[in-house]
Amino acid sequence: MTWQALLSEGKGLLKGKVSGEEAAEARELLLSILGWTLSEYALHKDEGATEPHRTAFLAAVERRAAGEPLQYITGRAPFFGYEFKVDCRVLIPRFDTEILVEAALRRVQPGMRILDICTGSGCIPITIALEIKRTLSKPMVQIEASDISGDALCVAQENAALHKVEIRFFQSDFFETAAGKYDIITANPPYITEEELRGLDAEVRDYEPMLALFGGTDGLDYYRRITREAPAHLTKGGWLLVEIGAEQAFVVSKMFVEAGFSKVEVLKDLAGRDRVVVGWFGG
């Protein structure tokens, strides 16, 4: 059996399981197992497939057909043009979160101290660090990140090492062990409501960590905490930026105002849905 024939077999096994993406997903699984680029596959596709790789590929296809997210099987996910290690200890980075990163980057100045809470895979602070490094010759920015999950922090630290950026990670229940004040605080907290939880795709509900998904009955539990606690950890003139669910902009914006934030702004994602709330803290 050639590599091309093996790939066709994988496509057939995924047919009807992955919403018409069987060709792309089978190809990604095979390339991941082989460690090949698409060009390398094109060069070798008519050669005989080795048995260990065939076994590994079919096992990966079986996992995907059962509903396990592709990113957990390959162990990687794209975000902001970079690649991050992921597994079942962390949420899979979503493109919508790139809006939060872009908004934070527009507010970064040399010498700032930045904190990302609920960091998960670390994709937010690591991307901020990479983009600052790319655009500023002497960034002089201190970036820290926290999560309540020690398992998630292990993944985040692996990603920081992969991308060669310096970030101080620490375990914390939101701001519990944060020290000092920050110029920018970012967060993508759990915000799925109880009702939404029941309707989630099995691919999300059964595989991604519930700790990073469920935001309480109305999905707003963590925004209440963040807006209440963040002012004590922000410098005068500091910024708070949070990702939100598409129906939460009005309520979360109101929380910002009630907590003393001004210049409150709602940013939309590429689909036109409310996605990020930003607020300035005058002190």
Image (cartoon, rainbow, N blue to C red):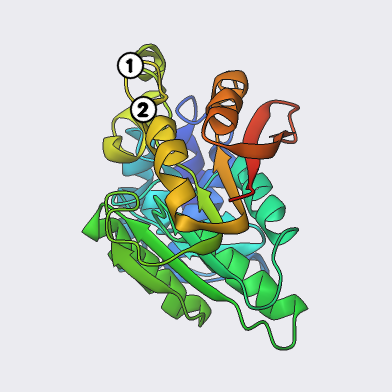
**Label 1: few (<14), some or many (≥20) within 10 Å?**
some
Residue 123 place in picture, x, y as percent: 51, 59
Tell me, for residue 170, which label it has, or none.
none
The residue shown at (41%, 16%) is: 196
The amino acid pointed to by label 2 is Asp
Q: Is residue 69 above or below residue 273?
A: below
Task: Please state which of residues 113 and 76 is positioned toward the viewer in this rendering.
Answer: 113
- Residue 71: x and y, percent? 44, 50
Question: Around disc 2, counting alpha carbons within 10 Å, would you say few (fewer than 14), some (14 to 19), or many (20 or more)?
Answer: some
Q: Quadrant of residue 106?
A: bottom right
Viewer-nearest of discs 1 and 2: 2
Which of the 4 image quarters holds residue 190?
A: top left
Q: Nearer the viewer, residue 259 or 79?
A: 259
Q: Which residue is mark 2?
A: 221
The alpha-carbon separation of the residues under discs 1 and 2 comes to 8 Å
* Residue 151 at least partly seen: yes
Residue 46: tell me if it is visible. no
Q: Nearer the viewer, residue 268 or 28?
A: 268
- Where does label 1 land, which residue? 217
Numbered label tally? 2
Q: Is residue 268 left or right of residue 27?
A: right
The residue at 40%/57% (across/down) is 86
Which of the image's four quarters has the N terminus?
A: bottom left
Q: Amino acid at mark 1?
A: Thr
Q: Is residue 231 above or below residue 220?
A: below
